Amino acid sequence: ALRCAGYNNVDLEAARTFNIPVVRVPAYSPHAVAEYTVAMMLSLNRKIPRASWRTRDGNFSLQGLIGFGMEVLAYDPYPDGVFARETGIAYVSLDELYRRSDIITLHCPLTNETKHLVNETSIARMKRGVMIVNTGRGQLIQTEALIEALKSKQVGAAGLDVYEEEGDYFY
């Protein structure tokens, strides 16, 4: 039994061979995922861990702890025009999303098309200092490319609810 919606970490052929049933969480509340994503964005953008450390040290300065307003851009191979009009989002190409976004959040399944969606090439097309939040699947991001981008400051912050190699730690 898996505590997640994804099952790419299970050898389904072996399970069938040994007649082992595999069950998983069929879906998560989209509201809960959205709230968690926004919480990570705010924590990273408002530098809440840094603010907490400062407060403990008696430093109440707001310098470097800025907020943000936003225009929401979205990429989807199957855009929903009604949803876009109702929510005020703008669907754009993936290249435009990479080029214009200050914050990129990932909310897609792991498929052959989405594996390593964030990689060295796509990161190079992003704004310098972009924030990346992944609440989808770990392998949406190529870990080595993200680490190098964090070191070089091409990516300014990363909020990861999932990790490409998490199977080594959790399964």
Image (cartoon, grey):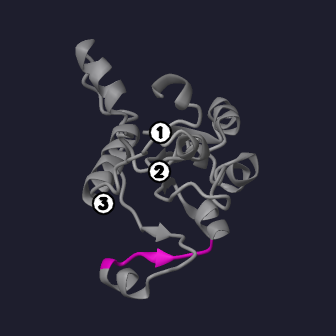
Residue at the spot of label 3:
30
Nearer to us in this view, 138 or 18: 18
Quarter-of-image position of residue 125: bottom right
As drawn, is 146 to the left or to the right of 8?
right
Residue at the spot of label 1:
162
Nearer to us in this view, 16 or 36: 16
- Which of disc 2 and disc 3 is earlier in sequence? 3
Residue plotted at (27% across, 12% down): 57
Q: CA distance from mark 3 to mark 2?
A: 11 Å
* Magenta-tinted stretch: 87-93
Label 1, residues with CA under 10 Å away: few <14, some 14-19, many ≥20 = some
Residue 129 appears in view = no
- Which of disc 3 and disc 1 is earlier in sequence? 3
Residue at the spot of label 2:
136
- x and y percent of residue 5 in the render? 40, 50
Q: Is residue 62 magenta?
A: no
Which amino acid type is shown beneath numbered disc 1? Val
